[in-house]
Image (tube, helix red, strand yellow):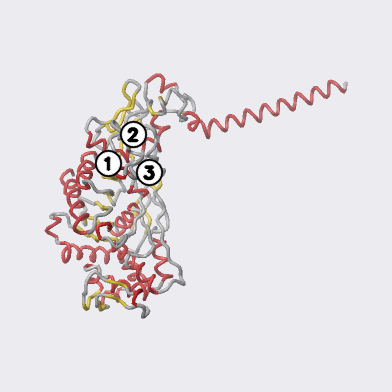
Amino acid sequence: MKMITRRGVFLWVLCALFIIGAAFLTYSLVTDGSVWVMKTYNSHVYSNSQLIAAGSITDRDGTVLSETVDGERVYNSDSGIRLSTLHAVGDKKGFISTGVQSIFESELVGYSLWDGVYKITKNGSGNDIELTIDAEINEIALEALGDYKGTIAVVNYLTGDIVCMVSTPTYDVNNIPSDIDSSDEYEGAYMNRFLTGLYTPGSTFKLVTAICALENLGSDVLESSYTCTGTLDVDGIEEDEIVCNATHGTLTFKQALAKSCNSAFAQIAIELGAEKLIDTAESLGFTSSVTVSDRITSAQSRFYLEKSDADTLVGWTGVGQGDTLVTPAAMLRLMCAIANDGKAVSFNLVNSLTDKAGESLGITFSSNETQLISSETASTMKELMRNNVTSQYGDSNYKGLSLCAKSGTAQIDDDESHNTAWFVGFMDDSEHPYAFVVVVECGNSGSQTAGPMANKVLQAVVADD
């Protein structure tokens, strides 16, 4: 009898363990099934570590950017389109980790909990993704960048749809350079500089300082005047002087922003103090990352300033030459907020995901609006940035764009040719609601190098609309 009882207990224990094991496997299948399928040793999906079984990726006009043909992953036949859309699409081996082909690989392949890889085997490829970018606009942006390393991005500031996102250096996925991992020419070629590049913002950061002043000192700051003698003596130590790009004399707040006066904006930053600058930078997203289509995450911008820091560092930080490092994505998000009544919309790169029959997969993305600044501040900043163009950059250089902008020339070292050139802003046009960011490494001057690039791309965007 005792033997039977022991056997019964033993069987109950085995049953319990079996149930627990089955439950664990079921849970793992539900939560990690797609991860298991997307292992490079799965011959249904990969060949020689290269993705082969996946649906097509197209731009917003239906131009095929990447697809599976006869068990092989192929890209558009136009080399310009391949080069300019590579960082948005991604490569075959997943080296470009922020590319759609990597981020949405299980959806592209068509894995499902119920069918597993059956449809992959049956159809030879999975689901299709349509992106928000325009391949032709991307190609024009690539041409505009030329031999420079950098990035150009354009987004609809009302919808958050990314129309253009180009990063250089890039490479032809159909003819990968043999020295891609050793040559300086291809340094950072796997990196999408729009999302993961971290740059000294230069004078574009004066927009942040201006916003901080408007929201803490009020509109009275617009009536203030500042004296620029070419240098600003902060603490009596010559080595700590803040050097300006010119001797501007007496300037109003509006003139100081248009002429990008370091002396004036250092004075404003010091008057505000480190704590207020820190709070504003954090609220505007300069200490956080930017998310695209809910899954693609940018690098985290970095704002290095402490409440106890000396006035000299506070002043340099206020003009964009402190220790701050900004992603182009974070700066573009701010441009969208200024253009859109203070509200920043969620960025999106994916228009739709459908199966081979053209039926929607039912996957949606966030469409949130975040109030970064007050409506009043946004309106004032729009006027100030419009004045930058009409009084300083030349409206005739941006014909028909109703451009509001700010340039930046970030000094990296004593060699001016190493400067990072910025040009950021938006079109104040309800029919063409686009914001943009251009960053050019070793570009010397923001307005002279990055500005014409922005004009070339935006003119193409308007013509395409």
> What percent of the width, then of the height, locates residue 464?
17, 43
Local secondary structure at mark 1: loop
Answer above or below: position of 92 versus 387. Answer: above
Name the image quarter holding the C terminus.
Answer: top left
Local secondary structure at mark 3: loop
Amino acid beneath label 3: Ser
Label 3 crowd (10 A; few <14 / some 14-19 / many >=20): some
Q: Is residue 198 left or right of residue 463?
A: right
Amino acid beneath label 2: Ile
Q: Is residue 234 left or right of residue 4?
A: left
> What percent of the width, then of the height, locates residue 404?
22, 60
Farthest-out residue, right:
1
> What percent of the width, then of the height, locates residue 462?
17, 47
Name the image quarter holding the N terminus.
Answer: top right
**Location of mark 2 (residue):** 129
In three-dimensional space, the C-alpha distance between marks 2 and 1, rounded to whole angstroms, equals 12 Å
**Location of mark 3 (residue):** 293
Q: Nearer the viewer, residue 12 or 238?
A: 238
Q: Quadrant of residue 428?
A: bottom left
Q: Is residue 391 visible?
A: yes
**Location of mark 1 (residue):** 133
> Mark 3 and 2 residues: CB-CB less than 8 Å, in contact?
no
- Residue drawn at x 21%, y 42% is 137
Answer above or below: position of 152 versus 77. Answer: below
Q: Is residue 362 visible?
A: no
Local secondary structure at mark 2: strand
In three-dimensional space, the C-alpha distance between marks 3 and 2, rounded to whole angstroms, equals 13 Å
